[in-house]
Image (cartoon, grey):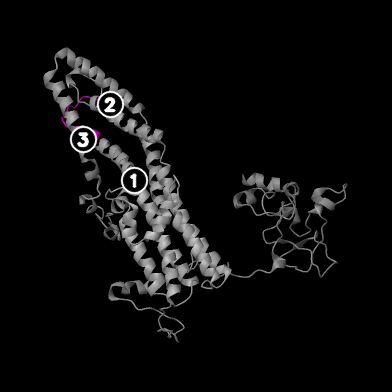
Amino acid sequence: MTVTYTARVANARFGGFYKLLLLWRGSIYKLLYKEFLVFFFMYAALSITYRFFLTEDQRRCFEKVSLYCNNYANLIPVSFVLGFYVTLVVNRWWNQYLCMPMPDRVMCAISATVHGSDERARMYRRTLMRYCSMSGLLILRSVSTAAFKRFPTIDHVVEAGFMTRHERKKFENLHSSYNKYWVPCVWFCSLAAQARSEGRIRDDHAYKMLIEELNAFRGNCSMLFHYDWISVPLVYTQVVTIAVYSYFLTCLIGRQFLDSSQGYSGHDLDLYVPVFTLLQFFFYTGWLKVAEQLINPFGEDDDDFETNFLIDRNFQVSMLAVDEMYGDVPHLVKDRYWNDSDPRPPYTAATLFQKHQPSFQGSTFDMALTKEDMLVQPLSDIEEMNEEASTRPFPLFSRLFPGVGPSPISSSAALTAPLVAPESQMTLLRRSSCSTSRSSDSLYLEGPDDHTQAETLPHPETRPPDVPLQSLFTVDSPSSSERGAPIADTIAPAQ
C-alpha cells in the first residue's frame, strides 16, 4: 500500500521532517541498506588488507594506485547524468498516474444521457458501465503485476463478473495477435448506438458527449499500454547505472586513508571510517534507487500504484452511480441561507481565529497618497509630451543643463537663452479647438506684479533667419540687466 505521510507535514514546524526520518516502510533505508553494507564491508576489507597484510613495497604500489584513482574519479559525471535521469523518470512516473483509467466522467455521462426507469434502461446503463470497467481491467492486468496475479486468465475476469460467458466467446473468437483491451470499447459504442435508436439517448448531442467521454477513457488506457511498451531508452539507464557503480568502485581504492608518514597531499589525517564517502554513496546510490523504484510504478514496491484497490473502487462507484443513484434526487427545498444576502457558514472553536483575518483586497488596497498628489489637474494645464519636451528621470541634470528635461524650447535654444527669474512662470498653451485666434506656438511670460502684460514670442523654428536667437528671448523688466545674462555666464561663477 502506498506510504502516505501528508497529514504529518500539514503544518510546517520545527523538526517537522524528523519524524519522517524514523519511518521504515517505503524509506530509503529499506531500499538501500543492502548496497550500503556491501560497500562498507568492501571498503573495510581493502583497508585492513592495506594496513596489516601488505608488504612495504606492496603498500607503496597500492598508495600510487589509490592516488591515481582519487585524482581521476571526478572525471565521471555522476551528478550530471544522474540528475537528468531522475528528472525524466519522475516526470514519467507522474504522467503514468494521470493516465490511470478512471471511470468518473463516463459514469456521469451515462447517468445523464441514458434515460429510463424500466429494467431495460437499467440494463443499458449497467452494461455500458461494465464494458468501460472491463476495458480498464484488461489494460491494468496487462501492465501491472499485482493486477495480473489477481486476474491471471480470462476465466478469472469472467468469474469476477466483469465479463459474461457469451462475451468471453466473442472475445476469444476475435483473432488478433495484439492486445484486445479495446474490444469492450467497441461494444460500448455499438450498444450506445442501439440505445440512441430506441430513444433511450434523446438527442445526438447527448450521444456525441457520451462517445467523447468514452474516447477519453480509451485514450488513457492506450497511453498506459504505450508507457508499458516504450520504456526509457536502455542506453540511458545503462549509462547512469555504470556511471554510479564505477564511480564508487573507484572510490573504494581512491578514498582509502594512506600512511600519513609518506607525506601525501590530503592524507595528513588517518581515520578508519570514511564518513563523507559513505554519505556520498548514500546520496548518489539512493538517488539511483529512487529512479529504479519509480521507473515502473505498476510493480509491488511500497510506493507503486495500488491497481487492485483502484479496480475495486472504480467498479463499485461506477455501478452505484449509474444504477442505484439514477433518478434518486433529494427533495428540492430552500437552503438555510435562503433569505440571507450575506451567507456566512459557521466556524468551529478550532478555526475561530481565521474569521478575524482580513480578506485580501488587492496589493494596492492599503496604499496611501498625499492630498497634493490626489488633486485632479485640468487637461489644459498639462504639458503635452513629445520628443523635445519629455520628462527625464534625472532632475539634477535638468537643473544644471536647461536643455535637458521638460522644456517648451529646443535644447540648442535653451543653452543660449537668458536666465529667467525664479518667480517667473513660463507656460506653453496647448492648441484649443474652441479658440483659433491663439497660436499653439506662442510663449507667454508672466511677471510677479503685472499678470496682464504678456509678450508673444515667435517659435524658434519659425523666426526670421536674420533675427538673432538671443533677441527672441530678451525680457524687458526693471532688472533685465541682471536677469538678461546668458545662462553660460551665470553658471560659470556658481561652479
Local crowd at mark 2 within 10 Å, few (<14), some, or many (≥20)?
A: some
* Contact? badges 1 and 2 (CB < 8 Å): no
Asked whether residue 163 is in view, the answer is no
The magenta segment: 266-277
Say above or below: 267 vs 36.
above
Callout 1 amino acid: Leu
Which mark is drawn over residue 275?
A: 3
Which mark is drawn over residue 250?
A: 2
Residue in the foreground of this view, choosing between 272 and 308: 308
Residue 282 position, x and y percent, is 25, 38
**Can you tell which of label 3 and label 1 is closer to the viewer?**
1
Residue 390 lies left or right of residue 297; in this view the side is right
Marks 3 and 1, Cα distance to the nearest angstrom? 29 Å
Marks 1 and 2, Cα distance to the nearest angstrom? 27 Å
Q: Secondary structure at mark 2?
A: helix
**Can you tell which of label 3 and label 2 is closer to the viewer?**
2
Earlier sequence position, callout 1 versus callout 2:
2
Callout 2 amino acid: Thr
All told, the count of numbered labels is: 3
Q: Secondary structure at mark 3?
A: helix
Residue 219 position, x and y percent, is 47, 54
Residue ID for mark 1:
294
Residue in the foreground of this view, choosing between 449 and 271: 271
Which image quarter: residue 408? bottom right
Say above or below: 163 vs 360.
above
Residue 431 lies left or right of residue 286; in this view the side is right
Earlier sequence position, callout 3 versus callout 1:
3
Residue 350 position, x and y percent, is 28, 72
Local crowd at mark 3 within 10 Å, few (<14), some, or many (≥20)?
A: few
Which mark is drawn over residue 202?
A: none
